[in-house]
Amino acid sequence: MPSIKSLILQGEGVMLDFKKTITSTEKIAKSLVAFANNKGGKLLIGVADDGSIKGVKSEEEEKYMILTSAHQFCKPAIEPHFEEIYVDDKLVLVVNIPESDTKPHYALDDQKKWWAYIRIDDKCVLASRIIVEVLKQEYKSNGVLISYSENEKKLLEYLEQNDKITLKEFSKLLRSSYRKAQKVLVNLILTNVIKSHTTEKEEYFTAVR
């Protein structure tokens, strides 16, 4: 593992998150779930957002909060692994979250609702229905066999002419329900023909070049 200092220099990203301290089990569940639904990741507890090392006062308390969150606020439960590392006489708690093979995971919010999250850059983003479907299928699919119907052809032709398409535009193109359009998109993501992109404002799809 690279040294904590070199990790911190990389800054927060898809597989790295800094937390000065754990303040809420609900909030931390989001990060745990987003990492488990993605390629895994590390939480560095005792490190501020700007990368300055503050250290943790009580690693037992922090571990207790994280384990409570991982077991009670994440569904299915997540098993994080801990490492305690001293940097300049300050204790940093490293929480390793492996990529899960029981995706999708959901986090419980303060309204007692379960939501799936994924990690995009340095943010935990709510997973769209399409992404949840992809996560469900990823581990079940022993290779999705795809026969290109008219619907797939229409999408690929459209993407040859245009950079991207949204679910709304695609269902309009097919003159079909969102559900039917969604199914085509999920299959094409699983077979790595198209890619999903999520921004704060919208979700759109592009061809894999």
Image (spheres, rainbow, N blue to C red):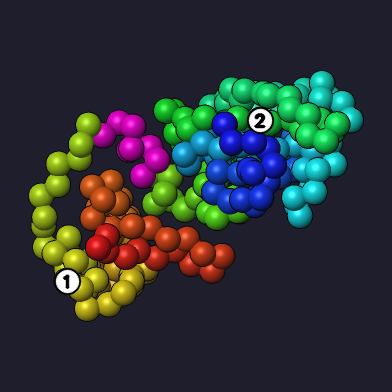
Q: Amino acid at mark 2?
A: Val
Locate the C terminus by quadrant. bottom left
Amino acid under label 1? Glu
Q: Identify residue for label 2.
A: 95
Q: Main secondary structure of the magenta part?
A: helix
Q: Which labelled disc corresponds to residue 48?
A: none
Quote the CA–CA distance across marks 2 and 1: 45 Å
Specify start and end residues of the magenta stretch as a single range.
134-141
Is 186 situated above or below 2? below
Residue 157 numbered mark, or none? 1
Report the number of discs: 2
Which residue shows up at 26% across the image and 50% down it?
192
Which callout, 2 or 1, points at the residue further toward the start of the chain? Answer: 2
| Residue at 75 percent of width and 50 percent of height | 51
- Pointer 1: residues within 10 angstroms few (<14), some, or many (20+)? few
Which secondary structure lies at badge 1?
A: helix
Which quadrant of the figure contains the N terminus? top right
